[in-house]
Image (tube, helix red, strand yellow):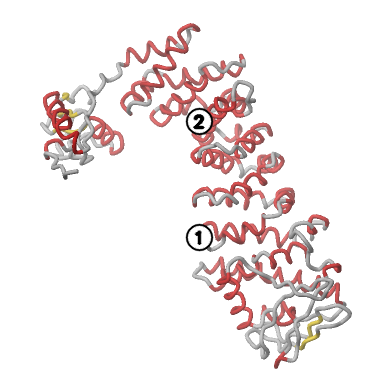
Amino acid sequence: MEEVDIPTYFICPISLQIMKDPVTVETGITYDRESIEQWFLTTNDMSCPVTKQPLPTDNSNDSMTPNHTLRRLIQQWCTINAINGVDRIPTPKFPLNRIYAVKLVKDLGVPHLQQAALKKMEALASENERNRRSMAEAGVGKALILFIVTCFQEGKTNGLLEALRVLHHVWSVDEETKVAVIGNNDFLESLTWVLGLNHDNGHNHMLLLKIEAILVLKMTIPVVNTAQLERLKLEFFMNISTLLSEKKISQKAVKSALHVLVEACPWGRNRMKIVESGAIFQLIELELLKPEKHVTELIFNLLANLCCCADGRAQFLKHDGSIAMVSKRILRVSHATDDLGVQILSSISKFSATHGVVLEMLLVGAVSKLCMVMQADCPAYLKKKGLDLFVISLEVVEQAVLAEAGGDKCGVVAEVRGEGGGGDAIVGDDGGGEGAGDGGVGVGGGEAGEIVLEDEEGGADEDSNEDEEEALLFEDVVEGSGMLQGFRGVGGGGGGAPGSVEEEAGVLPSGKVGAQRRNVPREVS
């Protein structure tokens, strides 16, 4: 295929692409119609982009003259160069007349003309921005809102898909439509009804309806008033949670659903309803699929807010992969995810930290990830938050170990905080595995031991991380600071031996990581 030289007068000065519908403004400069209209819309500058001369501010579309001669030359050139892969430019359609748009709005009120009018609206709205503006000026948005509410009240779905699509198209250019939904509770209930439709009429068709409804809902939620947001029903959130569980849902619909939940989450009542709807489980399952960065940030934003309440933390801990998922994403997605991930772990450790939960954090690598946060290039407040969480984790581990071993305080937390020397560590069965700690942060005379778990036959199951690099950094941090010498039962000068914890004692959960923690009360004061 030969390289094609495009004549410069075929190129639009704005888009630098071949013009499809060339129009000439009063200054004599020719632009592609879509490009110059988008220029006027986004810049609010009614002047020629090339000459900077002012252009008429009233009825600017009529002041642009179609350059039919240039368009025919472009089409002829495209036909000649089709062998080189150049696509022919189609003849542009006549711009939508406002009178015709008003006629389509009137046809919506006639039952036997509704379907034809909706199909014509959908075709026109999908063509270009100019048609969408003409439809908005004719009041198409308000008419469609009324049509959707009527469908909800009468329980019919004929024409509903087309109506939602057209409303989605014209929403961004129609300010009157945005005003019409403020205080309109019937419209929100109508969208809730669409999201809850069953699949009796075909799964694919109903799924398309729900996807269009959630796209419209995403644009609706930010403009409704506070009273409407506070009165959202449980059914509303249950339908969104069910939609998130669909396998064939598009990424755009997933983002829209998450945005809706984020907008509604700040209100306490809504937060409880989101938890009750089972959304936390769906959010974790969605994140385990490794979605794109923005989706992960939205999910962590929701989980951080939902874990602020006791029921939210309880539902979070019911999922066996919740803590592992959060720890895995920290330092791997974005700074926002790091902050929210540490906030989630902090909420769990402060208010739901049984020894089973905290020791699970050790097993799945959450504590080692906190060490990485303290060493990584993170903001100071995040490192402080990570250190506080690390201390809380060690306190719970220390209490659990002492409760089983019956020994004296081993000084683990004191070493982390730099509060004097550490005492002897007793981690084992029947007083075995003692080791004297040197005390003080960064002292540690002996070689760092390892947290081990002995089974009934005396074998050891080492604490493992998926990432060897994370595990090595964790060892470096701990060995350099002496943080865990007391807990590990490693004494100064190499005199100590790694301690052991019996599975049947219940200090470390046996079998599935999340299994034992659910049998222990989660909320601790």
The secondary element bearing badge 2 is classed as helix
Q: Residue at x 53, y 51 (%)?
A: 297
Contact flag, marks 2 and 1 (Cβ < 8 Å): no
Which residue of the protein is positioned furthest toward the bottom in this rendering? 493
**Image x and y of residue 313, in percent:** 71, 52
Q: CA distance from mark 2 to mark 1?
A: 30 Å
Q: Residue at x 56, y 60 (%)?
A: 339
Above or below, 135 against 36 in this view is: above
**Image x and y of residue 7, in percent:** 11, 39
Tag 2: amino acid: Val
Relative placement, left or right, of 324 versus 92 is right
Relative placement, left or right, of 266 versus 356 is left
Residue hosting label 2 = 216
Say which label, 2 or 1, has the lower sequence index.
2
Residue hosting label 1 = 335
Above or below, 242 against 341 in this view is: above
**Image x and y of residue 218, in percent:** 52, 35
**Image x and y of residue 244, in percent:** 60, 39
Q: Residue at x 67, y 52 (%)?
A: 307
Q: Dot 1: few (<14), some (14–19), or many (≥20) neighbours within 10 Å? A: some
Which residue is at the front of the view, 327 or 185?
327
